[in-house]
Image: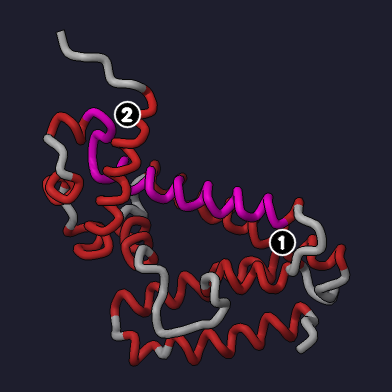
Amino acid sequence: MSPKVSKEHKEQRRANILEAAKDVFIEHGYEQTTMKHIMDAANVSRGGLYQYFSNKEDVYEAILEEMLGTSMDRTEEVLKSEDPSYWEYLLRCLYGPDMEPDNKMDPLASPSLEFFITGRNDPRRRKYAKTRYYNGLKLFTDVIEQGKISGEFTTSFESEMIARTIISFTDGLALDQAIITKEDVKIKEQSILFIEYLRTILGVKQ
């Protein structure tokens, strides 16, 4: 009779698999990654991996859900906090804790686009992509709306449309980076210009 494994242990093992899988997807991209790659990186047996995930699509969806859940939780904390800077929060969402653009993007941005583009004819993946899009749209829209209510942002432009431009810009950069070099894309230069665009339409004071 096999020993019982605690719920906490199972959750930790699943988390460890996902952390290892992130590195694999970053290294190989979505299409070239195999379950064998993930097994080796996570140091688990075939049965140990398939106990949690039936295929690499399940693994990647779990990674995306985890990332989105973290973003939503952080947004709720900001919206509930006293005297938050919604402008600074937007910059942290886009460019990390330093709030400064560079020539690097989220390393999972390209694998994520690959995941959705290669599965664009798959109803399940299209539905998942739409859910991801609207969750991200809600996140940015809520922050912008609260910034307007607090007086930090101007009310000149519709919050949802600004949120849509943020998503289109970041996804567009990720797509360009996936097919041509970072030097050609000029991620940092475009991002600096995009910050000025946001600053202008949101009415953020220097």
Secondary structure under tag 2 reads helix
Callout in the foreground (1, 2): 2
The residue that disc 2 covers is 10
Q: Position of residue 98 (x, y in %)?
A: 54, 76
**Relative to 126, is 191 on the left or the right?**
right
Q: Position of residue 156 (x, y in %)?
A: 84, 76
Secondary structure under tag 1 reads helix
Q: Nearer the viewer, residue 117 or 132?
A: 132
Q: In which image quadrant can residue 108 be found? A: bottom left
User: Does residue 96 lie above or below 101 as drawn?
Assistant: above
**Are circles 1 and 2 on residues that touch, CB within 8 Å?**
no
**Which numbered tag is attached to residue 143?**
1
Q: Residue at x 17, y 13 (%)?
A: 2
- Of all residues shown, which one is farthest toward the top? 1
Residue kind at label 1, given as amino acid type: Val
**Relative to 125, is 142 on the left or the right?**
right
Please report the bounds of the magenta region as a residue range. Answer: 51-78
